[in-house]
Image: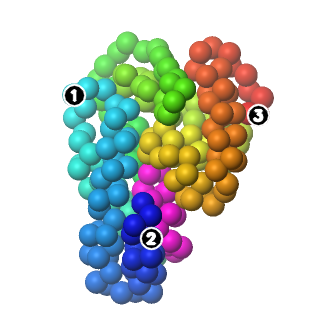
C-alpha cells in the first residue's frame, strides 16, 4: 500500500474538492491495491465461491461511488472504508446463498499465524454476527478484527489505517481473538473484551 500513498491521497483530495476527472484517476490508482484486498478477503471463502475478487472490487467501487461527498482524508482511510464495504458485500452474498439452504451451526477455527478461517456460508454469517457484538463492546477491537479477518491486512497496515501503534494493534487483535473464540465455541461471555 505504501507505493501509492502520496498520489492516491492527492487524487482523493481532488475528488473531495469537486474535480470530476479525479474519480477515474482514483479508480486507476487504487484498483491494484483493492484487488489485493479482495483476493485476501476471498482467501477466507469456500472453494468454488461464486463471487470473484474482480467482482468484489467492482461492487466495492460501486458502493464507494455511492458515498458522494465523502470527506476522504487519505489513502489509509479510503482502503479502510473499502475493506469494510467488502465485508458487507461478502456477508450479504452469504446471506443470500443461505436463504435457500438449511443446515445451520457455526464452526469457525482460528489460525495463530494470521487470520481466521471460515469454510461455510453459515460461518461467514456467524462471524459477522459475533463481530457485530464485539463492535458494540469495543469498537476499536471490532475494527481490528474486520481489517484482519475480512480484508486480510497485516498488523502494520491496520496500524496505518487506524492511526494507532503496531503494538496496540497486536494487543487488540490478541484480546479480540480470545473473546471471539469464547463466543464462537460456546463460552458466551458478554463481558467486555
Q: Magenta segment: does it hold 80?
A: yes
Q: Which residue is mark 3?
A: 192
Circle 3 residues within 10 Å: few <14, some 14–19, many ≥20: few
Would you identify the image quadrant in which residue 123 lies? top left
Look at the image and say whether residue 47 sits in the magenta stretch: no
Which residue bears the numbered disc 1? 48
Q: Residue at x 44, y 42 (%)?
A: 152
Q: Which residues are magenta?
A: 70-84
Residue 158, x across and y down, in percent: 55, 51
Q: Residue at x 25, y 39 (%)?
A: 51
Would residue 25 be seen by someone viewing this image from the given angle? yes
Q: Is residue 45 above or below residue 55?
A: above
Q: Position of residue 78 (x, y in %)?
A: 46, 64
- State the residue position of label 2: 5
Report whether residue 127 is seen. Answer: no
Looking at marks 3 and 2 on the same chain, the residue that comes earlier in the sequence is marked by 2
User: Distance between the Cα atoms at labels 2 and 1?
Assistant: 34 Å
Which residue occupies the foreground of this view, 32 or 98?
32
Question: Hey, which quadrant is residue 8 in on the image?
Answer: bottom left
Q: Residues within 10 Å of mark 1 (few under 14, many from 20)?
A: few
CA–CA distance between discs 3 and 2? Answer: 35 Å
| Left or right: 3 in relation to 115 | left
Give the image location of residue 12, x and y in percent.
Answer: 42, 76
Give the residue displayed 70% in from the left and 47% down from the top.
168
Q: Give the label, 3 or 2, closer to the camera.
A: 2
Q: Tell me the quarter of the image containing the C terminus.
A: top right
Q: What kind of element bears circle 1? A: loop
Q: Quadrant of residue 97?
A: top left
- In percent of width and height, residue 22 lies at 33, 81
- For label 3, the SS is loop
Q: Quadrant of the N terminus?
A: bottom left
Tags 1 and 3 touching, CB below 8 Å: no
Amino acid at each position: 500500500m505504501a507505493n501509492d500513498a502520496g498520489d492516491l491521497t492527492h487524487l482523493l483530495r481532488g475528488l473531495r474538492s469537486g474535480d470530476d476527472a479525479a474519480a477515474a484517476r482514483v479508480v486507476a490508482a487504487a484498483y491494484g491495491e483493492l484487488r489485493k484486498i479482495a483476493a485476501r478477503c476471498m482467501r477466507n471463502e469456500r472453494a468454488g465461491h461464486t463471487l470473484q475478487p474482480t467482482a468484489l472490487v467492482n461492487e466495492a467501487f460501486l458502493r464507494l461511488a455511492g458515498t458522494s461527498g465523502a470527506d476522504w482524508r487519505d489513502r489509509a482511510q479510503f482502503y479502510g472504508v473499502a475493506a469494510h464495504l467488502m465485508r458487507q458485500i461478502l456477508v450479504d452474498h452469504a446471506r443470500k446463498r443461505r436463504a435457500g439452504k438449511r443446515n445451520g451451526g457455526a464452526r469457525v477455527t482460528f489460525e495463530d499465524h494470521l487470520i481466521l478461517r471460515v469454510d461455510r456460508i453459515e460461518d461467514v454469517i456467524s462471524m459477522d454476527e459475533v463481530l457485530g457484538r464485539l463492535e458494540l463492546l469495543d469498537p476499536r477491537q471490532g475494527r481490528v478484527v474486520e481489517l484482519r479477518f475480512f480484508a486480510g491486512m497485516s498488523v502494520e497496515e491496520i496500524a496505518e489505517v487506524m492511526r494507532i501503534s503496531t503494538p496496540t494493534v497486536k494487543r487488540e487483535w490478541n484480546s479480540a481473538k480470545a473473546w471471539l473464540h469464547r463466543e464462537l465455541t460456546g463460552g458466551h461471555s458478554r463481558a467486555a473484551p
